[in-house]
Amino acid sequence: MSILKVIAGVVAIGISAIFVPWDAGYAIFDPLPATVRAEVDSSPRHGLDGIIVYVDQGGKPPAFYAAGWKNRLAKTPADPHALFKIASISKLYIAAATVKLVAAKRLSLDDTLDHLLPQYAGRIANADTITLRMLLRHRSGIPNYITDSQFRWDKATDAAEVLDLVLGKPADFAPDARHSYSNTNYLLIGMILDKTLGYSHNDYIKAEILAPLGLTHTFGRMSDVNPADVVSGYAVGYDDDMKPLDCGLPGGSMVATAQDVGVFLRALNTGTLLNHEEQAIYSSVYVYEHTGLWAGYESIARYHKDIDTVVVEFVNTSGGNAWMKAEIEYSRVIRILRNQHKQ
């Protein structure tokens, strides 16, 4: 290795050390352990209350890991099979459900918002030109309700009330002009699905997506489960358990185990959930992986094709540098798995 490359490497590490918060510096300086178990076991000392990691490697039995607390106050150890608020990972299920209805000709990707939800014509900017396709792809320009100063985490149970936060607001950009993630898009899609079906889209997801995959530990929202079965959530700077802060909003409301999310994700990515026509439609409108964030809850679900492995991570700490740490833990787990794959 040339001296210039050595100097460049030292400078790069120095710059990283300057800009990475001190309590996340282990991402650079801690040696990578040989096993996922060792990595997960070390994570609570970095300020994460609890962590669950599910690993599904093709051709191998699934592996379950957990460390820290399921309930910090009661000193209940983390349980890899516990239910968790998966937040925006819910959008993958809504996108798949929408695609099924499009393939069945019950919806069209070119349907406009004012046609699908006429009660909001004139109340949402560009409703006459925003299409279902744009909503799915986060290209509508509709403001994100969660960034509104009036949004309250403890009042996120009624879709119509939360939608009021953006009604009458100017668009962030012209329809289809660019991509900008907005939770409002999937809130509206949930409302569209309910209207199209004549019943809750959660029931449709259960019948058409969960049941065929044998997923019995995935639920539409917190009110469908025993709260004792759900991991407690914590926010940096607060002592209270965030579990009572229910999210009843489409695209963020679902509760599931890591294994159920992993089975769903593998089926979505490998073509066993959707038929050929549905898969083609899905590929044109949405992604095949997702993260989730709610008060006290962070989640990551991804399929890594190069090693044919699904990894789902749940962390029950939010705020401060918790998201950076969750991503660090996830990336270190993937590095370990890739190292093992090479052996």
Image (cartoon, rainbow, N blue to C red):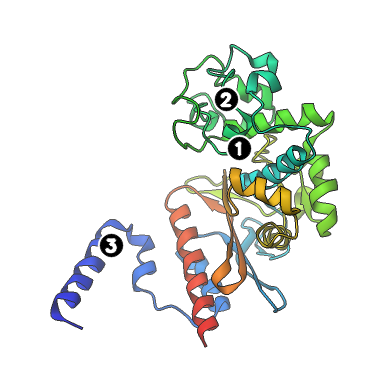
| Camera-nearest label, 2 or 3 | 2
Front-lying residue, 86 or 69: 86
Front-lying residue, 214 or 324: 214
CA distance separating discs 1 and 3: 36 Å
Task: Give the residue type that dot 3 points to.
Answer: Ser
Secondary structure of the residue carrying numbered label 2 = loop
Q: To which residue does mark 3 refer? A: 16
Q: To which residue does mark 2 refer? A: 130
Q: To which residue does mark 1 refer? A: 136
Q: Give the residue at x 16% y 81%.
A: 2
Spot occupied by residue 191 in the image (x, y as percentages of width and height): 71, 28
Q: Give the residue at x 23% y 62%.
A: 15
Whether tag 2 and tag 3 are in contact, CB under 8 A, the answer is no
Spot occupied by residue 269 in the image (x, y as percentages of width and height): 65, 59
Secondary structure of the residue carrying numbered label 3 = helix
State whether residue 297 appears in this view. Answer: no
The image quadrant of residue 258 is bottom right
Q: Judge whether 139 appears above or below 272 on screen.
A: above
Spot occupied by residue 154 in the image (x, y as percentages of width and height): 62, 33
Front-lying residue, 168 or 342: 342
